Amino acid sequence: EFRAATFYPLGNAETSGCAVLTIVHGQPQSSPNVEPDNRRRRLADLHAFIAEMQYESTSGINLDLIVGRSSQSKLIRRQIDVASQTAANVLIVGPPGSGRRQIAELIHFAQGPQQAGPLIPIDGTLSDAEIVQRTVKSLYRNAKLNPDEPLGRLMLLDLDKMPAAAQSEIVGFSKLPDFRLPMIGTCTVLDKTIRDELLNEIATLTIRIPDLIDRRQDLPLLIHALVEEYNVHAGTSLAGFETQAVDMLIDYPWPGDFFELKETVESACAAASGPIVGVDELPHHFRLAVRSLNHQVPGGDPELQLDQLLADIELELIQRAMAHAQGNKSQAAKLLGISRARLLRRLSDHSSQVSTDDSKGIDDAGGSESNGE
């Protein structure tokens, strides 16, 4: 196939840069120097912006999680750059699935693992006061025995779900006169579940990650960044998504935020038969969900509860897939275009909404599945 290349300089040196190949279907009508069509120009512009954003990151860290031109994305990138160059405590606030932990890791390891030291996770949903005390004591002893080595940092995950007693342990250690306790935390909301003393200690710099649907204008760039990331890991050379497919991805509410988008894009890329990912390559369950959302609400329903509607659609799709697969969860997961582990989580989430007969069918599915697999 005929190909065209565009050169993007990196920095001020004219001899340093990268050439981006874009595939053009068919043969040129006149000469190889034809002007690229609108789609190729659009994809090239997306790539150029992503390359420029990465270059402008003074810390050199991967910022694909918050790629975009919106004011929120620009602010978050600046905050991440600042946080990655200091040892200040950081609190990252955002919805589940928004990549809070990944951003915490980017900040901590931006200067290199040897210089940063270990990043020690403490899960607020699983840790009690004893676990916190044992973990911080170990960090304290290591600091005393190896004063010349990097101390590292505590990564407090889901701080708003951590028991009050465990939070008190952290506050106590932070007050030791001969020991500075470096921390980076994540939470969904800032409320009274986090002790004021701990919040004042950890929120030296607070980074707020908005819901994906609150920065829809960033989605075309974010989708293209995910395609480029997929190309790197899968060894493919996909050019991007066609406009109609991008529009569908933009219109979807993304209750699972960034990681649901990432899973959907990767699934579509894996199914692509050509350089451009089309609507038909999007996961079947995603297209069904979008189609259901586009249906008009019948008269007499003054309010539409979006979360409940999506849950009902998901439940119906799961039940149909399980019935079609005759209870085999692995086969049902393939029909839905999701992993088996994700299907098991969805079955668990919907267990209270399934009738007695349906529950029995799901239980029996495990038995038939073990024989079939």
Image: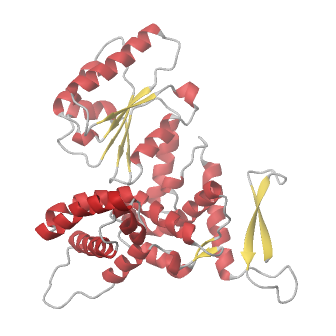
Give above or below for 77 relative to 296. Answer: above
Can residue 83 be seen from the camera position used here?
A: no
Residue 105 coordinates in the image, percent (x, y): 47, 39
Give above or below for 204 relative to 103. Answer: above
- Frontmost residue, 318 versus 255: 318
Residue at the location (27% across, 39% down)?
159
**Relative to 286, 280 lies left or right:** right
Can residue 58 be seen from the camera position used here?
A: yes
Residue 237 coordinates in the image, percent (x, y): 68, 65
The residue sitting at the right extreme is: 31
Give above or below for 141 relative to 216. Answer: above
Q: Give the image quarter of residue 170.
A: top left
* Colour mode of the rendering: secondary structure
Residue 341 coordinates in the image, percent (x, y): 36, 55
Residue at the location (25% across, 40% down)?
125
Residue at the location (68% across, 76% down)?
40
Residue 20 coordinates in the image, percent (x, y): 74, 64
- Frontmost residue, 5 versus 2: 2
